[in-house]
Image (cartoon, rainbow, N blue to C red):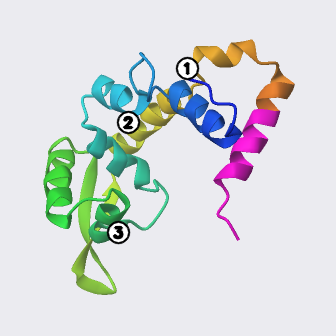
Amino acid sequence: MERTVADPATDAWKAILSLVGWGSGSAPRFPMVALELDLSPKQLGVLWRLDPDGPGSPMRAIAQSLYCDASYVTDLVDRLEERELIVRTPDPGDRRVKLLKLTPKGTKLRQTALERLYAPPAGFEQLTPEEQRTLARLLEKAAEPAE
């Protein structure tokens, strides 16, 4: 990994990208998990964003969170529905809006995906539990929205 002395924030970010597979020789985890589960990365993104216990998410909100056009989400949803992973239901407050909900099969596949995504990479075994807690705390702090 390249090192710069002048910018420790850039060094930290490069290390994070390398750790998750971006910028290194290893494959990025998210697309690999999607492939293992016979999903496209965007399909996995849809499943990830759906709360298994929630009332459903509007398709437009899912499209915005995936940074893609609503018509593209329709295609993703069609394919996920064919696999019986999600269902579209009308929003009780606005019947023009379609809500996406996980099916039991979709909930199970989502859980499997999250278990694989959240499994720490091999490099974490080099850190002590205290170092792992410190790293988690620092990354959570860095991920907080700026005030």
Question: Which residue is label 2 attached to?
Answer: 109
Q: Residues within 10 Å of mark 1 (few under 14, many from 20)?
A: few
In the rendered image, the residue lying farthest to the right is: 130
Question: Which residue is label 3 attached to?
Answer: 61
Q: Which mark is residue 1?
A: 1
Asked which quadrant contains residue 23, the reply is top left
Q: Residues within 10 Å of mark 3 (few under 14, many from 20)?
A: few
Q: Nearer the viewer, mark 3 or mark 1?
A: 1
Between 110 and 126, the residue placed more toward the observer is 126
- As drawn, is 131 to the left or to the right of 73? right
- The residue at the point 32 percent across, 32 percent down is 34
Between 88 and 122, the residue placed more toward the observer is 122
Instruction: Give the total of numbered labels.
Output: 3
Q: In the rendered structure, which amino acid carries the disc numbered 2?
A: Leu
In the rendered image, the residue lying farthest to the front is: 6
Q: Which residues are magenta?
A: 134-147
Q: In the rendered structure, which amino acid carries the disc numbered 3?
A: Ala
Q: Position of residue 64 (x, y in %)?
A: 33, 65
